[in-house]
Image (cartoon, rainbow, N blue to C red):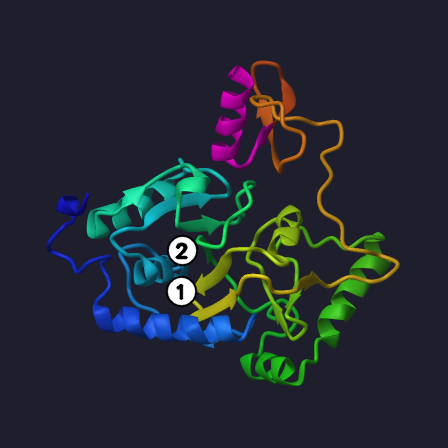
């Protein structure tokens, strides 16, 4: 595979100085779970907001022996996933895969794979908005002080107002969580379904926001708890009575799709690799 590298670029596109800087900031992020570490975000041949933060992490960490998987909302075949995968293939020449279990580094947008990840795997998130307090407080100097003082009363108040108005917490993605009992962080726009996978996971979770120039991390076996009230506990999405139209799964996160042929709504696994694996198992 290394013979396929485009020799006009450095290995994995970024220069070595940039990689070292990002690795140092990544180590600091791992040492302080949930803390947003500033870094000098580089220019890449994709637009900011389309995964530059996660891509910079991937390009800085990847080595010749790594195997990469890229997904977008669970799919390996979206434009975003395919474009990023081709960029890494052309500049690093490493092997890529659609099988979750074969990958050493997985870059994702908006989902965590259904298959549990192992200790020797890294999941890199593309993060559009790393600051969980931004929707409440637009001033950067105030949010930094709130993190320093562990003053998250405004977020608790926001959740309480949700309950008063709607009877439930209506946050459907980017649900605010506490890492290691200290820092409030945004798990990126993953659905609530994926939040429990963050708690005491075996793998390393890395979050990169290129536009906001922030890196943060959840190391393996770290306590991650979503904000919730005793009388209004945290709940994930319910798919009771629904199943994937392709593999028949009823215990995975399902996308709702309108079937023009039947004129009805059908459901399909968001994680395409997991769905294909279940289909193969059904055929045996």
Q: Position of residue 172 (x, y in %)?
A: 67, 50
Sequence-first tag of 2 and 1:
2
On screen, residue 180 above or below 50: below
Q: Position of residue 11 (x, y in %)?
A: 20, 58
Name the disc covering residue 51, or none: 2
Residues marked 2 and 1 touching at CB (< 8 Å): yes
Helix, strand or loop status at disc 1: loop
On screen, residue 127 above or below 216: above
Dot 2 alpha-carbon crowd within 10 angstroms: few under 14, some 14 to 19, many 20 or more: many
Q: Position of residue 224 (x, y in %)?
A: 65, 63
Dot 1 alpha-carbon crowd within 10 angstroms: few under 14, some 14 to 19, many 20 or more: many
**Residue at image point 35% right, 47% down:** 68
Name the disc covering residue 105, or none: none
> Which of 82 and 121 lies nearest the eye of the viewer?
121
User: Going by the image, does 63 lie left or right of 213?
Assistant: left
Q: Position of residue 30 (x, y in %)?
A: 49, 70
Check disc 1 and report the residue beneath it.
210
The residue range painted magenta reads 268-284
The picture quadrant where one finds residue 158 is bottom right
223 is within the stretch colored magenta: no
């Amino acid at each position: 595979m290394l013979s396929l590298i485009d020799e006009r670029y450095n290995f994995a596109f970024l220069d070595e100085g940039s990689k070292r800087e990002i690795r140092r900031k990544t180590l600091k992020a791992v040492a302080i779970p949930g803390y947003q570490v500033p870094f000098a975000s580089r220019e890449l041949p994709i637009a900011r907001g389309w995964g530059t933060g996660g891509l910079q992490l991937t390009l800085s960490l990847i080595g010749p022996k790594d195997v990469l998987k890229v997904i977008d909302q669970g799919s390996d075949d979206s434009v975003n996933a395919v474009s990023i995968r081709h960029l890494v293939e052309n500049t690093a020449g490493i092997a890529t895969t659609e099988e979750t279990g074969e990958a050493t580094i997985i870059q994702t947008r908006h989902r965590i794979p259904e298959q549990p990840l192992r200790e020797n795997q890294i999941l890199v998130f593309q993060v559009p908005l790393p600051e969980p307090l931004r929707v409440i407080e637009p001033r950067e100097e105030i949010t930094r002080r709130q993190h320093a003082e562990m003053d998250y009363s405004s977020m608790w108040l926001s959740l309480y107002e949700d309950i008063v108005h709607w009877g439930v917490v209506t946050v459907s993605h980017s649900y605010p969580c506490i890492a290691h009992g200290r820092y409030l962080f945004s798990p990126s726009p993953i659905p609530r379904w994926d939040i429990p996978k963050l708690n005491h996971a075996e793998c390393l979770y890395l979050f990169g926001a290129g536009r906001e120039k922030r890196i943060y991390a959840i190391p393996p076996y770290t306590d991650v708890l979503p904000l919730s009230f005793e009388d209004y506990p945290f709940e994930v999405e319910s798919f009771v009575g629904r199943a994937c139209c392709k593999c028949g799964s009823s215990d995975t996160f399902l996308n709702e799709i309108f079937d023009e042929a039947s004129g009805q709504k059908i459901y399909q696994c968001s994680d395409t690799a997991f769905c294909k694996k279940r289909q193969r198992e059904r055929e045996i």
